[in-house]
């Protein structure tokens, strides 16, 4: 233990008794009192150093302070009412808002809403007294003003003066009638004073009356001027209730919003109840914020947009907007005239007029939310000559490349090509509803990651909504039902009333300019060219160059070999147990100081493997024109197909410098400098390249090449280089500061880029493209080596030409870049460029300010001269033929000389000696004869040796820099609580059965259950045999139930306490969910956050495939996102689903440490999670890309501290238990984690070592020598572990903790939790290596609130009884009332109890009834398991169902919904039947209309599904057994499917069958274009080729007709011989020999249903048909 003597004897005069009374006192206090929160926030536990400030929450506000998601929609009716519309439209909008309450959330007081609001046409009837004949429609401002009257009057005076100065006649103020008593306590405390102001248009704009564009521009610019003048006058305050904010200022639209729940909005704003409030449209919005501090301006709608989602590229978007603004500005006198129509037109069309802070409020600011920044840019574009749909098409483009739906509209494709060159996409999950007063519309992001449904009624009203059913409509009145697909838009012209669908509005917009002609004339394309075979250096020079740039032997032997040999990144295992770069004694490249950020909870990662159709790595070079003004010059750019350039492509770019070939002038700047200048020379060298870049761009250079390439060995001998990341960042920011960045593109020509992470860093900090000359030279060297050629000849490597090897390398880099983009939820590399989506760890302020401005670096670190020294350390002594690269051992441990690895075979041996494990004793050897199964006595002395080895080890983790400093005297260990109590807090990491062998997985579960801890299933499911406790163990510790295990005891349980639900939904069945004591949602994994799990094919044995409902031998990859979690409210929905099916099980959410995790944790707590797990980025894994293991995720010390601090500060800490894992090995680790806020602790790799793992690091190869991670029978027999070994380890750790507690003077473990004041920086540790001179932890850990006296957060909330949090489970509210009614129905209860007969019951449903059927499934599962219900429950339901209708349905459950449903219908369906059909008198065509939402049947494992209408995106994702029929789908149908059958009787979107490894799909091809929509990477497709296939298809359609009365099905069946020829059959290789695909199988039966009463009736002999009896029984 690193425990200072001072820490052992320090005493602070707080006696035990006073501490206890303090706890009791605080526990009785309501902890959400705002004054208490302020007190907690103002204190900190960890002592700050002199001159330092707290920095835990430094960074862009949308990242570290607040994120949000929401429900949104609009209603538009231009036909009814008079000129100013009707009050009915407003009423319907408010009703819809109320019905989306579950998509919002409340603040810490549980009452104040996170935000709700509406935007409407200005209600002129209501404002009649401010209108006149000569001013019928004045400008109206909705203004939030300070509560204090004296402040408010001063602000009003400034506003009036600015208006008058800009010729706006002031017509008066109107105090908005409000009822503050309707507000919650927090909202009431922060509520502004609400006023409206009215101004007349300037006389100079009299000719503007018809379009009112000039007046709108003046109002817009004056609003921005007012905020500047208020600041100049000193009228800006920090108090929440003193902010001045314009919710709207327009002559066309007005916004009412606030920190309220939806139902409270019309109670607070009395205007909304007034029948004179009439409008033709309403946009409504309900917000879910991850934070709880009320801020009224953050409510939505914004001024033009209502946004549901998150902008993942925000930092880059804002950086680029600011870069555009830095260029030369107009003369100030022109900016002073905000009235003249021509002048204001000029102002809003130019980027460089927006950055004049003394005249106009800044357009964008990272202190605002992502929605506010998007709204600001969108608003400015609408004030220029962009129409609103045009602006949104530019900002949030669709994935137009290879989009079949646009094949007949080249003008739309040309529009996107043109604007894609000008503007970086604002990328992320987004449903955007917008209005500029002239039109109203909605658009969806390119991935279709938010729900969006619409209906049109006979009277012309358009209803657009996040959820269908929020407005009560008579289906007989509906003429059309639809949904927005990925990248699609709808628009309603508010003047003409015309409704325009996606193609109509986009074609209209795109036809306004000849974009195609402009591109043809101005754009230069650089397509991929052949690679050069010639070497640039000889082998000796190449090796020397590699050494100077930091290459190691592993980089060639692992990375280059895999990338050039197979076009893939290296796969590795076991996590990252090497020191972080700043603590390493070895030299590191600058890249290693950066960790990639990733999406979790508030926005999803996307899928580069299966949904790459929406992604692109294309980039541009050249000068970019204004984004607000469209002209031909905007097309003049160099377009790069790939950002990874070879020498021939560099030559092609150079050729464009010729005047006749484009005239793109270029400049090359060397980044090398003299070695003799020493480490400090780097600073002058950086200044020199920045000065040169500025000079060259001012002289017209449009392509700047930063090159570290040396001509020859002689130049290398006398020079060194600026690391390319430092160089490109410095030049990028310097050009921004000089207003020149948009005038040129930057190409980095470097020898220091070979890993995908390197390329991401370079592009992320400003590079447009990279020429990796040394990586390509290394591929040539590798390819030409005797070893490589020998491996190719022997078949160990695929034989390739040199050109193919270089192509492979580039493909691997491109795919790696897509993976890195996707983990942040970004689709386009052009949006990632300059976005700086990294956190620095170990870089000092000097480095950050020079090259990485705006990047968070929260512990300080190395300076520029340190980087120069580290670069010099990599240099080989000389170049020679015999010279070899250093093997740094950064990935694989290298004995003695290599990098330190905490988990090593030596460490494993020490631990095995301590716990009595002999790896030579196993089932394969002599276990049966050995005494006590070969378990030797545990040795305290050997555990001390194990501990000491870690204490004396090199620095590796942040916690190694910490020491303890107690506030009291030591106590006797006899006074400390027993080890048994401490071990109850121990958990195992989520290691799946499949990644681990049965022996290893079950042994861990039994061991943890023995000590009262919490074992975790991981994501692979569990055998149902494990549910029962053991009662058949003999005297030798053997059980027939588990013949492969030893050391068992009667009463042991192998059932994991925690059952995990991951994105692949492997093994997730109703019984799996109901037999858990806790359910964990795996949002991210420490070893590869932002990516899905993977299980290599060789590890998918028959047994594993059975548990996972997949195919043996086929690699399993989980989707990177949960396809039912694209936002925080979606997570809340899955938590709701799990609480529904198992009300007694808490729900935990697994997150990975990253900047901003605090605000994410707040959102998770508000989403009703019971436990939040924080994993470190160094967590273990069975298989992961190497770059992900090394470069994503932060240490848990930072994530845990931030989550605990944010939860405590926001009054949410008592709602959740905090658990932590990631490289935890000792009692010291646990004590530190507890002091940082953790209550439970997970063991991963070290627990595997405790059962026999020897750290061979071959988990991904299925060759584990001791059977811990292998599925091979012969290796599994070598498994040496028993539960006793693991229990021994846990006991040692618990006793170590007890010793520590005694030293610190604490008897109860819980008294350490959150006590960061007991930690201090260790000066001795910081001095161990030179690189830590600039490291300081106090700024970060000093941000942890002081909880020494207020310990109430350790108990559940008073509303939940205030007991132990482990005993409390959050319960679903009214949204599960229908479920409870169903479960409590006497007939239903009797049917479950009696387990026989048919029961029929009926219920009505509305969209707020969610997870309907899940509670009933839970009741059945607990009583009868997955398949034991013998009777039938026929449940008829009428209405619009909320999300997750029919989730986890079981055999015997038959749900028939007449009406419609939202997203996730049939989620996790395991059997039974779900039928959805419209009402009989519906006025729309069912086959053309959407009836169910997105991601239906996600993770289904059985059952029959029939929908008489269309489904949304991602239908049957990860379906492994359901038989489903619908009448058309959106994109990504059958993605990741592993079993079952899908029939689509209508058109489908693109990317059908991506990642499909099992099951069959049948698709009716009406338009003859199905082949364009299939992802052919895995699946094949053919016409119906066999009698069995025809039989299966026809019977499923007949069944569909019988169940739904489908007119489409009837028409197809009536003309079967002709119509069957229009079907395509899609199948993966695993189904190629099945009877339905191939005629080669004789006598096989064909399955036509998943839920027939008798299994044999589910099948038909080939060539047979259903007889009448079978038809009836199968249908029923």
Image (cartoon, helix red, strand yellow):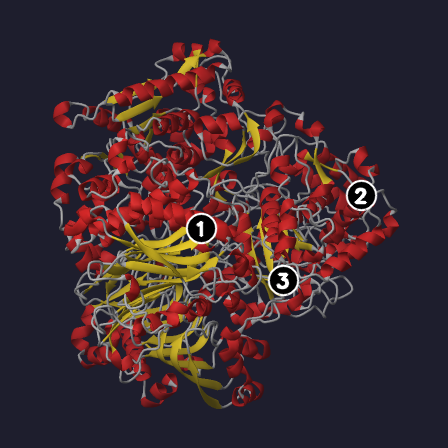
Location of the C terminus by quadrant is bottom left
State whether residue 180 is above or below residue 894: below
Residue at 78 percent across and 64 percent down: it is 1035
| Residue at the spot of label 1 | 153
For marks 3 and 1, the one nearer the N-term is: 1
Q: Residues within 10 Å of mark 1 (few under 14, many from 20)?
A: few
Q: Is residue 232 above or below residue 102?
A: above
Q: Position of residue 1590 (x, y in %)?
A: 26, 73
Secondary structure at badge 3 equals: loop
Tell me which numbered mark, 3 or 2, is placed earlier along the sequence: 3
Q: Quadrant of residue 1478?
A: bottom left
Tell me residue 143's x, y (percent).
39, 54
Placement of 1351 over or under 796, stated as above or below: below
**Residue found 84% across the figure and 49% down from its top:** 15
> Is residue 1064 visible to the viewer in this orientation of the structure?
no
Identify the residue position indicated by label 3 in the image: 1056
The answer to whether 1293 appears left or right of 435 in the picture is right
Residue at label 2? 1304
Looking at the image, can residue 1418 be seen?
yes
Do tag 3 and tag 2 residues touch (Cβ < 8 Å)? Answer: no
């Amino acid at each position: 233990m690193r425990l200072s003597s001072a820490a052992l004897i320090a005493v602070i005069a707080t006696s035990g008794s006073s501490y206890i009374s303090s706890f009791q006192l605080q526990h009785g206090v309501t902890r959400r009192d705002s004054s208490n929160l302020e007190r907690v926030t103002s204190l900190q536990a960890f002592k700050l150093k002199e001159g330092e400030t707290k920095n835990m929450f430094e960074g862009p506000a949308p990242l570290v302070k607040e994120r949000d998601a929401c429900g949104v929609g609009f209603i538009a009716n231009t036909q009814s009412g008079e000129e100013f519309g009707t009050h009915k439209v407003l009423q319907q909008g408010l009703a819809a808002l109320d019905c989306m309450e579950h998509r919002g959330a409340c603040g810490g007081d549980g009452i104040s809403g996170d935000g709700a609001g509406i935007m409407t046409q200005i209600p002129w009837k209501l404002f009649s007294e401010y209108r006149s004949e000569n001013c019928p429609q004045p400008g109206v401002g909705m203004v939030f003003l300070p509560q204090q009257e004296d402040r408010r009057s001063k602000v009003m005076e400034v506003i009036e003066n600015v208006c008058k100065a800009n010729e706006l006649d002031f017509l008066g103020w109107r105090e908005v009638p409000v009822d503050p008593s309707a507000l919650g306590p927090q909202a009431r405390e922060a509520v502004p004073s609400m006023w409206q102001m009215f101004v007349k248009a300037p006389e100079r704009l009299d000719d503007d009356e018809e379009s009112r564009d000039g007046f709108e521009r003046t109002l817009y610019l004056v609003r921005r001027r007012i905020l500047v003048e208020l600041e100049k006058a000193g009228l800006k305050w920090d108090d929440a209730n003193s902010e001045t904010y314009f919710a709207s200022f327009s002559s066309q639209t007005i916004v009412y919003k606030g920190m309220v729940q939806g139902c409270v909005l019309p109670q607070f704003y009395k205007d909304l109840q007034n029948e004179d409030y009439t409008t033709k449209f309403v946009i409504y919005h309900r917000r879910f914020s991850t934070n709880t501090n009320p801020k009224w301006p953050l409510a939505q709608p914004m001024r033009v947009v209502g946004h549901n989602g998150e902008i993942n590229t925000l930092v880059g978007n804002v950086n680029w907007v600011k870069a555009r603004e830095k260029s030369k500005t107009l003369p100030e006198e022109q900016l002073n005239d905000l009235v003249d129509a021509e002048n204001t037109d000029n102002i809003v069309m130019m980027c460089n007029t927006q950055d004049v802070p003394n005249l106009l409020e800044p357009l964008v600011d990272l202190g605002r939310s992502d929605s506010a920044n998007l709204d600001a840019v969108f608003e400015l574009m609408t004030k220029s000559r962009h129409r609103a749909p045009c602006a949104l098409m530019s900002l949030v483009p669709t994935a137009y490349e290879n989009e079949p739906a646009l094949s007949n509209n080249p003008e739309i494709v040309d529009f996107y090509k043109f604007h894609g060159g000008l503007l970086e996409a604002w990328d992320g999950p987004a449903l955007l509803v917008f209005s500029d007063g002239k039109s109203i519309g909605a658009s969806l992001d390119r991935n279709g990651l938010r729900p969006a449904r619409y209906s049109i009624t006979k009277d012309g009203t358009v209803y657009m909504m996040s959820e269908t059913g929020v407005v009560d409509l008579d289906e007989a009145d509906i003429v059309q039902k639809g949904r927005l697909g990925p990248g699609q838009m709808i628009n309603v012209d508010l003047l003409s009333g015309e409704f325009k669908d996606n193609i109509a509005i986009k074609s209209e917009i795109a036809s306004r300019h000849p974009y195609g002609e402009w591109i043809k004339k101005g754009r230069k394309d650089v397509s991929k060219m052949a690679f050069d075979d010639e070497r640039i250096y000889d082998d000796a020079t190449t090796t020397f160059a590699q050494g100077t740039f930091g290459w190691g032997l592993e980089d060639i032997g692992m990375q280059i070999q895999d990338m050039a040999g197979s076009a893939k990144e290296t796969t590795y295992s076991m996590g990252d147990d090497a020191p972080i770069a700043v603590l390493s004694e070895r030299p590191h490249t600058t890249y290693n100081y950066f960790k990639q950020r990733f999406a979790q909870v508030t926005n999803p990662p996307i899928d580069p493997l299966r949904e790459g159709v929406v992604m692109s790595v294309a980039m541009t070079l050249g000068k970019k024109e204004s984004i607000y003004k469209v002209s031909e010059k905007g097309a003049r750019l160099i377009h790069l197909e790939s950002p990874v350039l070879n020498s021939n492509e560099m030559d092609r770019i150079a050729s464009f410098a010729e005047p006749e070939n484009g005239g793109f002038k270029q400049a090359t700047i060397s980044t090398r400098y003299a070695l003799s200048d020493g480490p400090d020379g780097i600073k002058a060298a950086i200044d020199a390249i920045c000065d040169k870049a500025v000079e060259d761009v001012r002289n017209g250079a449009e392509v700047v090449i930063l090159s570290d390439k040396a001509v020859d060995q002689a130049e290398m001998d006398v020079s060194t280089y600026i690391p390319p990341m430092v160089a490109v960042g410095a030049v990028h920011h310097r050009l921004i500061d000089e207003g020149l960045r948009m005038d040129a593109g930057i190409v980095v020509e470097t020898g220091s880029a070979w890993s995908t992470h390197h390329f991401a860093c370079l592009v992320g900090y400003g590079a447009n493209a990279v020429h990796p000359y040394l990586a390509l030279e290394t591929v040539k060297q590798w390819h030409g080596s005797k070893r490589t050629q020998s491996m190719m000849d022997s078949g160990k490597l695929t034989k390739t030409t040199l050109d193919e090897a270089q192509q492979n390398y580039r493909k691997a880099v491109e795919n790696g870049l897509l993976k890195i983009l996707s983990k942040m939820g970004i689709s386009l590399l052009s949006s990632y460029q300059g976005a700086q989506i990294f956190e620095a760890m170990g870089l000092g302020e000097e480095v950050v300010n020079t090259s990485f401005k705006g990047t968070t670096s929260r512990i300080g670190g190395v300076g520029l001269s340190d980087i120069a020294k580290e670069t010099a350390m990599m240099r080989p002594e000389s170049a020679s033929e015999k010279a070899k690269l250093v093997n740094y051992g950064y990935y694989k441990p290298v004995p003695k000389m290599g990098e330190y690895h905490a988990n090593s075979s030596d460490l494993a041996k020490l631990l095995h000696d301590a716990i009595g494990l002999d790896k030579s004793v196993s089932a394969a050897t002599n276990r049966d004869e050995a005494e006590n199964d070969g378990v030797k006595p545990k040795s305290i002395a050997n555990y001390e040796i194990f501990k000491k080895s870690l204490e004396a080890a090199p620095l590796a983790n942040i916690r190694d820099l910490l020491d303890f400093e107690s506030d009291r005297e030591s106590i006797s260990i006899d006074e400390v609580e027993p080890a048994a109590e401490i071990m109850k807090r121990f958990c195992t990491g989520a290691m799946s059965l499949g990644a681990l062998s049965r022996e290893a997985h079950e042994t861990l579960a039994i061991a943890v259950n023995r000590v009262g801890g919490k074992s975790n299933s991981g994501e692979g499911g569990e055998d149902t045999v494990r549910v029962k406790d053991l009662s058949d163990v003999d005297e030798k510790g053997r059980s027939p139930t588990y013949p492969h295990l030893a050391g068992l005891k009667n009463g042991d349980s192998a059932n994991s306490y925690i059952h995990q639900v991951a994105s692949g939904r492997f093994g997730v069945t109703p019984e799996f969910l109901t037999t858990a004591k806790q359910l964990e949602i795996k949002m991210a994994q420490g070893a590869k956050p932002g990516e899905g799990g993977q299980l290599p094919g060789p590890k998918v044995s028959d047994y594993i495939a059975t548990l996972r409902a997949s195919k043996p031998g086929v690699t399993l990859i989980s989707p990177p996102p949960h396809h039912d979690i694209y936002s925080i409210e979606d997570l809340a929905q899955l938590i709701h689903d799990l609480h529904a099916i198992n009300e007694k099980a808490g729900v935990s959410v697994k997150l990975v440490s990253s900047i901003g995790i605090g605000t994410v944790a707040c959102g998770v707590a508000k989403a009703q999670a019971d436990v939040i797990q924080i994993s470190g980025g160094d967590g273990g894994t069975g298989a992961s890309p190497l770059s992900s293991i090394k470069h994503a995720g932060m240490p848990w010390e930072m994530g845990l501290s931030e989550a605990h601090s944010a939860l405590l500060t926001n009054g949410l800490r008592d709602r959740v238990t905090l658990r932590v894992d990631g490289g935890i090995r000792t009692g010291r680790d646990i004590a530190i984690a507890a002091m940082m806020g953790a209550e439970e602790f997970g063991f991963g790799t070290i627990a595997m070592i405790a059962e026999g793992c020897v750290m061979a690091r071959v988990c991904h190869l299925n060759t584990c020598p001791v059977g811990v991670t292998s599925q091979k029978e012969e290796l599994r027999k070598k498994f040496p572990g028993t539960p006793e070994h693991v229990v021994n380890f846990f006991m040692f750790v618990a006793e170590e903790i007890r010793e520590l507690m005694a030293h610190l003077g604490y008897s109860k473990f819980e008294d350490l939790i959150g006590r960061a004041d007991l930690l201090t920086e260790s000066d001795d540790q910081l001095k161990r290596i030179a690189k830590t001179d600039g490291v300081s932890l106090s700024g970060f850990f000093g941000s942890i609130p002081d909880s020494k006296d207020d310990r109430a957060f350790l108990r559940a909330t008073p509303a939940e009884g205030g007991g132990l949090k482990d005993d409390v489970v959050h319960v679903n509210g009214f949204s599960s009332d229908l479920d409870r009614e169903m479960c409590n129905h006497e007939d239903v209860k009797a049917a479950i109890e009696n387990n026989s007969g048919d029961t029929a019951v009926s219920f009505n449903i509305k969209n707020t009834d969610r997870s309907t059927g899940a509670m009933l499934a839970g009741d059945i599962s607990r009583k009868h398991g997955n398949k034991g219900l013998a009777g039938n429950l026929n449940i008829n339901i009428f209405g619009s169902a909320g999300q997750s209708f029919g989730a986890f349905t079981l055999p015997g459950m038959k749900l028939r919904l007449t009406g419609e449903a939202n997203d996730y219908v049939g989620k996790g369906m395991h059997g039974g039947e779900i039928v959805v059909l419209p009402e009989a008198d519906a006025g729309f065509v069912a086959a053309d209309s959407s009836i169910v939402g997105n991601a239906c049947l996600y993770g289904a494992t059985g059952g029959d599904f029939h929908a008489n209408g269309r489904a949304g995106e991602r239908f049957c994702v990860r379906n492994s057994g359901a038989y489903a029929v619908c009448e058309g789908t959106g994109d990504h149908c059958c993605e990741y499917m592993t079993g079952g059958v899908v029939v689509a009787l209508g058109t489908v979107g693109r990317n059908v069958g991506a990642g499909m490894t099992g099951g069959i799909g049948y698709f009716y091809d009406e338009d003859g274009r199905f082949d364009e929509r299939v992802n052919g990477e895995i699946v094949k497709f053919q016409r119906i080729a066999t009698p069995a296939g025809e039989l299966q298809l026809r019977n499923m359609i007949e069944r569909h007709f019988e169940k739904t009365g489908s007119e489409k099905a009837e028409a197809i069946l009536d003309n079967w011989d002709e119509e069957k020829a229009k079907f395509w059959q899609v199948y993966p290789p695993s189904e190629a020999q099945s009877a339905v695909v191939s005629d080669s199988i004789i006598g096989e039966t064909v399955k036509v249903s998943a839920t027939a009463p008798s299994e044999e009736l589910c099948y038909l002999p080939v060539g047979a048909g259903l007889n009448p009896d079978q038809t009836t029984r199968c249908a029923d």
